[in-house]
Image (cartoon, helix red, strand yellow):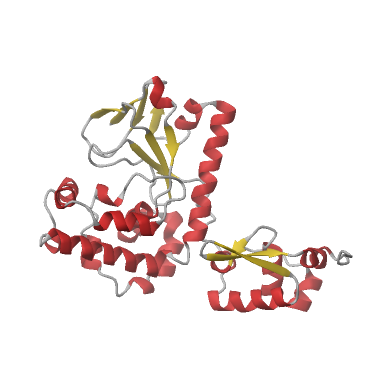
Amino acid sequence: MLRYVLEEQDVAAVRFGISPLSELGLSLRAIRHPASFPLQLPWVSRTESARTHLDHEVLDALIDERMWTPDFLNPRPDSPLTRLDDELARLRELPAEVFRRDLVAVHGRVPDVLAGPPRAAVRRVVAALEELWAASFAAYWPRMRAVLEADVVHRGRQIAQHGLGAMLNGLSATIDYDGDILSVRLRDPADRTQRIDGTGLTLMPTMFTRRASAPVGDGPPMVMYPARGQGALWEAERVANPAAVAGILGPTRASLLAALGDPASSTELGVRLGVTPSAVNQHLRALRDAGLLVSTRYGRSVLYLRSELGTSLLAGGRAPTP
């Protein structure tokens, strides 16, 4: 049992964060024991071949049979907008003593593959994680982040409507909050009590835990809990196509047009509709050239949105006159 003691000032400092690096590390649970994560089986299956040539020797050393991962893979995120590149940059600078300590806390020793010079070992860990990201996460992260961000919005709404206590008690069946102490029932047999003491408590939704999780050591107060809405994440979206529009555009382009009532990237659309990225981009260009979509750049992504002409076509109406 882990108990976080929240004083009055600590209650005001409860915040949410999203960590791409933590998702990357925790995903090793689903890869190691896919049967224990039925909601993620489609992701495990879809990415299996892409993971064939990864550095499995290092990745296997980052998790044990209890499905624990070292705390350096679960950094406290700065915000819900934390970037993987920033987290990996900090990991590269991890002090050698922290690297060893966190591994020993999980395995009881430093695994042989990481027992050499710490700088070289950290570089190899970062390289293995970057390869795992490229193989299994890059194409799916927009959808995953959307689920995680939607969970944060939902929890904020709960606080506004029902109060902090109701929100905390609704995070997981293994979390209890009595107004003073947040108790987290962990698989760790150790009994720990940690005061927040003004350092803040971070709540982090994740795709890769079935119950509440927390740092293995006495790091910054943080609770990882199962994000809502995972069930339909990996299923290809089935959008009802208006028959007349599908007859003109084809079923895939009609589905894309129907799906773009809200802005979305080509990567996200490919995951939602079960279409390859190259095919999605080809269809999107055709729809945009026809004036049925508009596009804009947002950060590193190009977002697409149905135009007024596209909306009118779906509705069977006429295009609006200027």
Residue at (55, 42) in percent of width and height? 153
Residue 119 lies left or right of residue 318; in this view the side is: left
Q: Quadrant of the N terminus?
A: top left
Q: Quadrant of the C terminus?
A: bottom right
Residue at (65, 74) in percent of width and height? 284
Q: Is residue 298 visible?
A: yes
Residue 90 lies left or right of residue 244; in this view the side is: left
Relative vertical location of residue 149 with respect to residue 279 in this rendering, above or below: above
From the viewer's side, name the closer residue of 98 and 255.
Answer: 98
Residue 186 lies left or right of residue 147; in this view the side is: left
Residue 58 lies left or right of residue 321; in this view the side is: left
Q: Quadrant of residue 235?
A: bottom right
Query: Residue 244: x and y, percent?
Result: 81, 72
Q: Quadrant of residue 55?
A: bottom left
Q: Is residue 67 visible?
A: no
Q: Quadrant of residue 186?
A: top left
Query: Residue 20: x and y, percent?
Result: 40, 54
Query: Residue 143: x and y, percent?
Result: 52, 58
Relative vertical location of residue 309 with respect to residue 150 in this rendering, above or below: below
From the viewer's side, name the closer residue of 172 and 83.
Answer: 83
Query: Residue 155: x and y, percent?
Result: 52, 37
Label total for image: 0
Residue at (46, 50) in percent of width and height? 81
